[in-house]
Protein backbone atom coordinates (compact mmCIF):
# COMPACT_ATOMS: atom_id res chain seq x y z
CA UNK A 1 0.00 0.00 0.00
CA UNK A 2 1.49 3.39 -0.93
CA UNK A 3 2.49 5.39 2.11
CA UNK A 4 0.00 8.16 1.46
CA UNK A 5 -2.93 5.79 1.83
CA UNK A 6 -1.90 4.85 5.32
CA UNK A 7 -3.89 6.54 8.00
CA UNK A 8 -1.85 9.19 9.75
CA UNK A 9 -0.91 8.27 13.23
CA UNK A 10 -1.81 10.93 15.69
CA UNK A 11 1.03 12.18 17.78
CA UNK A 12 -0.57 13.35 20.96
CA UNK A 13 -1.28 17.04 21.31
CA UNK A 14 -1.88 18.95 18.11
CA UNK A 15 0.84 21.05 16.59
CA UNK A 16 3.73 20.40 14.30
CA UNK A 17 6.61 18.36 15.64
CA UNK A 18 10.18 19.57 15.34
CA UNK A 19 10.72 18.09 11.95
CA UNK A 20 7.51 19.50 10.57
CA UNK A 21 8.38 22.91 11.93
CA UNK A 22 11.67 22.79 10.08
CA UNK A 23 9.90 21.92 6.86
CA UNK A 24 7.41 24.72 7.35
CA UNK A 25 10.17 27.22 7.95
CA UNK A 26 12.05 26.12 4.91
CA UNK A 27 9.09 26.24 2.60
CA UNK A 28 8.12 29.70 3.72
CA UNK A 29 11.69 30.85 3.24
CA UNK A 30 11.62 29.46 -0.27
CA UNK A 31 8.33 31.17 -0.95
CA UNK A 32 9.71 34.48 0.25
CA UNK A 33 12.77 34.13 -1.89
CA UNK A 34 10.63 33.43 -4.87
CA UNK A 35 7.89 35.98 -4.47
CA UNK A 36 9.63 38.86 -2.78
CA UNK A 37 13.13 40.22 -2.61
CA UNK A 38 14.48 42.74 -5.04
CA UNK A 39 17.36 41.73 -7.25
CA UNK A 40 19.69 44.08 -5.36
CA UNK A 41 18.81 42.47 -2.04
CA UNK A 42 19.17 38.96 -3.30
CA UNK A 43 22.23 39.51 -5.48
CA UNK A 44 23.90 42.74 -4.34
CA UNK A 45 26.70 42.44 -6.90
CA UNK A 46 24.29 42.43 -9.84
CA UNK A 47 22.89 45.62 -11.34
CA UNK A 48 20.70 44.09 -14.04
CA UNK A 49 19.85 40.86 -15.77
CA UNK A 50 18.43 40.58 -19.22
CA UNK A 51 16.77 37.37 -20.25
CA UNK A 52 15.80 36.15 -23.69
CA UNK A 53 13.60 33.16 -23.89
CA UNK A 54 11.85 30.91 -26.35
CA UNK A 55 9.17 28.39 -25.56
CA UNK A 56 9.20 25.51 -27.99
CA UNK A 57 6.41 23.01 -28.45
CA UNK A 58 6.97 19.24 -28.53
CA UNK A 59 6.49 19.62 -32.30
CA UNK A 60 9.59 21.86 -32.35
CA UNK A 61 7.68 24.99 -33.19
CA UNK A 62 8.35 28.25 -31.46
CA UNK A 63 5.35 28.90 -29.30
CA UNK A 64 6.42 32.16 -27.77
CA UNK A 65 9.50 34.31 -27.78
CA UNK A 66 10.29 37.14 -25.54
CA UNK A 67 12.59 38.93 -23.22
CA UNK A 68 12.59 40.27 -19.76
CA UNK A 69 14.83 42.80 -18.18
CA UNK A 70 15.26 42.69 -14.46
CA UNK A 71 16.81 45.76 -12.91
CA UNK A 72 18.22 46.11 -9.43
CA UNK A 73 14.94 47.12 -7.82
CA UNK A 74 12.78 44.56 -9.61
CA UNK A 75 11.82 41.32 -7.87
CA UNK A 76 14.39 38.59 -8.40
CA UNK A 77 11.90 36.33 -10.08
CA UNK A 78 13.32 33.87 -12.56
CA UNK A 79 10.42 31.51 -12.92
CA UNK A 80 7.70 31.21 -15.49
CA UNK A 81 4.67 28.98 -15.72
CA UNK A 82 4.81 26.44 -18.50
CA UNK A 83 2.57 27.45 -21.42
CA UNK A 84 2.25 23.83 -22.47
CA UNK A 85 -0.52 21.33 -22.04
CA UNK A 86 0.35 20.55 -18.44
CA UNK A 87 -1.55 23.74 -17.70
CA UNK A 88 1.36 25.53 -16.12
CA UNK A 89 0.21 25.13 -12.56
CA UNK A 90 2.36 22.16 -11.75
CA UNK A 91 4.87 22.54 -14.51
CA UNK A 92 6.91 25.64 -14.36
CA UNK A 93 10.33 26.67 -15.42
CA UNK A 94 12.55 28.01 -12.73
CA UNK A 95 15.93 29.47 -13.54
CA UNK A 96 16.66 30.60 -10.02
CA UNK A 97 19.27 27.94 -9.29
CA UNK A 98 21.02 28.44 -12.60
CA UNK A 99 21.12 32.19 -12.16
CA UNK A 100 22.48 31.79 -8.68
CA UNK A 101 25.22 29.47 -9.87
CA UNK A 102 26.12 31.84 -12.70
CA UNK A 103 26.24 34.85 -10.41
CA UNK A 104 28.26 32.97 -7.80
CA UNK A 105 30.88 32.26 -10.43
CA UNK A 106 30.77 35.76 -11.90
CA UNK A 107 29.55 34.75 -15.35
CA UNK A 108 28.20 37.46 -17.63
CA UNK A 109 26.51 35.20 -20.09
CA UNK A 110 24.56 32.14 -19.28
CA UNK A 111 22.17 29.98 -21.19
CA UNK A 112 20.34 26.76 -20.88
CA UNK A 113 17.30 24.77 -21.73
CA UNK A 114 14.67 23.13 -19.64
CA UNK A 115 12.10 20.58 -20.59
CA UNK A 116 8.81 20.33 -18.78
CA UNK A 117 8.44 16.84 -17.41
CA UNK A 118 4.96 17.28 -16.00
CA UNK A 119 2.36 14.87 -17.19
CA UNK A 120 -0.46 16.53 -19.04
CA UNK A 121 -3.17 15.36 -16.73
CA UNK A 122 -3.91 12.52 -14.40
CA UNK A 123 -5.23 10.19 -17.07
CA UNK A 124 -2.25 10.34 -19.40
CA UNK A 125 1.31 9.36 -18.76
CA UNK A 126 2.97 11.41 -21.49
CA UNK A 127 5.05 14.33 -20.36
CA UNK A 128 4.18 17.84 -21.40
CA UNK A 129 7.50 18.16 -23.19
CA UNK A 130 7.39 21.90 -23.72
CA UNK A 131 10.88 23.30 -23.87
CA UNK A 132 12.28 26.57 -22.66
CA UNK A 133 15.49 27.80 -24.23
CA UNK A 134 16.92 30.79 -22.55
CA UNK A 135 19.87 33.13 -22.51
CA UNK A 136 20.78 35.61 -19.88
CA UNK A 137 23.15 38.53 -19.71
CA UNK A 138 24.19 39.53 -16.26
CA UNK A 139 25.48 43.03 -15.58
CA UNK A 140 27.44 43.45 -12.40
CA UNK A 141 27.69 46.52 -10.25
CA UNK A 142 30.86 48.44 -11.14
CA UNK A 143 33.30 48.44 -8.26
ZN1 LIG B 1 4.46 21.86 -19.11
Image (cartoon, rainbow, N blue to C red):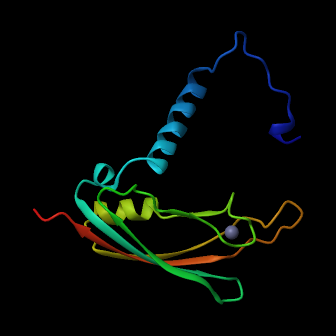
Residue at x 35%, y 51% (from the top left corner):
38
Q: Quadrant of the N terminus?
A: top right
Q: Position of residue 60 (x, y in %)?
A: 66, 89
Q: Quadrant of residue 120?
A: bottom right
Q: Position of residue 53 (x, y in %)?
A: 49, 78
Which residue is at the front of the view, 71 or 7? 71
Residue at x 30%, y 63% (from the top left corner):
103
Could you tell whether 114 is left or right of 4 in the image?
left
Image mark count: 0
Residue at x 77%, y 17% (from the top left corner):
10
Q: Quadrant of the C terminus?
A: bottom left
Q: Position of residue 82 (x, y in %)?
A: 64, 68
Q: Position of residue 136 (x, y in %)?
A: 38, 75
Which residue is at the front of the view, 28 or 107? 28
Q: Quadrant of residue 23?
A: top right
Could you tell whether 137 is left or right of 133 in the image?
left
> Residue reaching furthest top?
13
- Give the quarter the ligand 1 occupies: bottom right
Could you tell whether 77 is left or right of 110 in the image?
right
Could you tell whether 114 is left or right of 44 in the image?
right
Amino acid sequence: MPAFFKPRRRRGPAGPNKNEQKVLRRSSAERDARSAGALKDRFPTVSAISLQFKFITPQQEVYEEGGRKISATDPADFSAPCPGRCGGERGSFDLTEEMKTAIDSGKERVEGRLICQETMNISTVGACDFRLEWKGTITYVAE
